[in-house]
Amino acid sequence: MNAVVVHHHGGPEQLVYESVTDPIPDEGQVVIETRCSSVNFADIKARRGGYKNYEPPFIPGLDAAGVITALGSGVQSLKLGQRVAAYTTGGAYAEKVLAEENLCFLLPETVSFEQGAGIGIFITAYNLLTLAGRLQKGETVLIHAGAGGVGSSLIQLAKVLGAGRVLTTVGSEAKKALVSELGADEVINYRQEDFAQRVLEISSNGADLILDSIAGETAEKGMSCLAPFGRLVIFGHTGAGAAQFDSKQLHSQNRAVLGYSSGGYRKHYPEILQQSAEAVLKLLAEKRLRLLIGASFKLEQAAKAQALVESRKSSGKVLLTP
Ligand SMILES: NC(=O)c1ccc[n+]([C@@H]2O[C@H](COP(=O)([O-])OP(=O)(O)OC[C@H]3O[C@@H](n4cnc5c(N)ncnc54)[C@H](OP(=O)(O)O)[C@@H]3O)[C@@H](O)[C@H]2O)c1
């Protein structure tokens, strides 16, 4: 089969499309013939180096959708020919991928492979709002990078789950209309105005829940517009820097700073991901949630796809098809 392989850490040019050996399923694993894979910001960090245990050579990619073509021993709940979305074991930028049985999610008939390939960001967004964020009906939510993959899912899901006002930040005027269409009530271009000040103008108490994938100064500033009893959830470091907080900012106002990682759930609580997947796939089937597809590339153009996400000009999800 063909796949995209990173042989050396570095820029997008390090993504090499080449022939590799077909995957063989181990006990409890399946092989999925890929119909669509997704580009995640984590793939870019893995390619650049210094992120988790990604040592070359490796195939990047975390999730994909396709058809099951082989079953490893002991697989009970899945059958050949079933349409699934999955977190992959090994990279997803490949014509065939491996996945653990308990990290495969059956796609309803009406959910396309393209929509299914967004499973990772939908599960992340759902868990951020429910498990980590403990969203209550009517609360004000602030979502950073609202036009991005996770951000565009968060806006839609926050509304479905009963948020009051949904505020979001974007880095360009061009992205504003897009996030409003998804349901954001207020869009703040953080390059043109101070987002924390704007949040306090809109909601004098501040935001009850802030979902922050940027960290660094953005998270520090977030603390200045977090309401009493508010939760600031950090789930990424797109901005690279770590945030520093004073513990005095927390206890007297019952505020909390939390971390979230779907990777941690994959490892320790896969059964919770099954429940989250079921919830988001139901919403996708009912058309109450949709994957915002910003661009689609052939697998061999993975370098272009990643470069687009790095340029900050992409919106929603960037997809790869074999
Ligand atoms: N914890 C988890 O389980 C989990 C799961 C999935 C994703 N994540 C994290 O969530 C974040 C979003 O992931 P995604 O795949 O949906 O990506 P994405 O949001 O589509 O990423 C690109 C966007 O991030 C914003 N951005 C802000 N600072 C940036 C910088 N220094 N360089 C590039 N972009 C920057 C840009 O939007 P603006 O210009 O509009 O600000 C850009 O368009 C990433 O940090 C990712 O690692 C975490």
Image: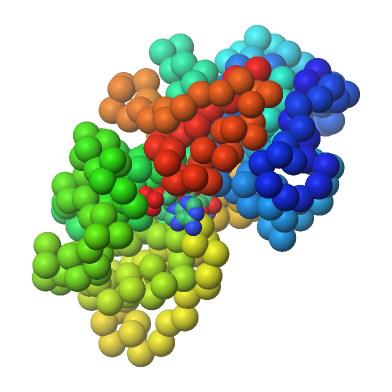
Q: Residue at x 74, y 41 (%)?
A: 14
Question: Residue 243 placed where, x, y %?
Answer: 47, 75
Question: Residue 299 placed where, x, y %?
Answer: 65, 23
Q: Residue at x 62, y 47 (%)?
A: 44
Q: Residue at x 68, y 47 (%)?
A: 11
Q: Is 264 on the left-hand or right-hand side of 292? A: right
Q: Is residue 68 above or below residue 146?
A: above
From the viewer's side, name the closer residue of 70 and 152: 152
From the viewer's side, name the closer residue of 99 and 61: 61
Quadrant (top left, top right, bottom left, bottom right) of the N terminus = top right
Quadrant (top left, top right, bottom left, bottom right) of the C terminus = top right
Q: Is 13 on the left-hand or right-hand side of 241? A: right
Q: Is residue 100 visible?
A: no
Given the current orientation, which residue lies at the most extreme right position? 21
Q: Residue at x 27, y 36 (%)?
A: 178
* Quadrant assignment, res 205: bottom left
Question: Residue 168 placed where, x, y %?
Answer: 27, 52
From the viewer's side, name the closer residue of 12 and 118: 12
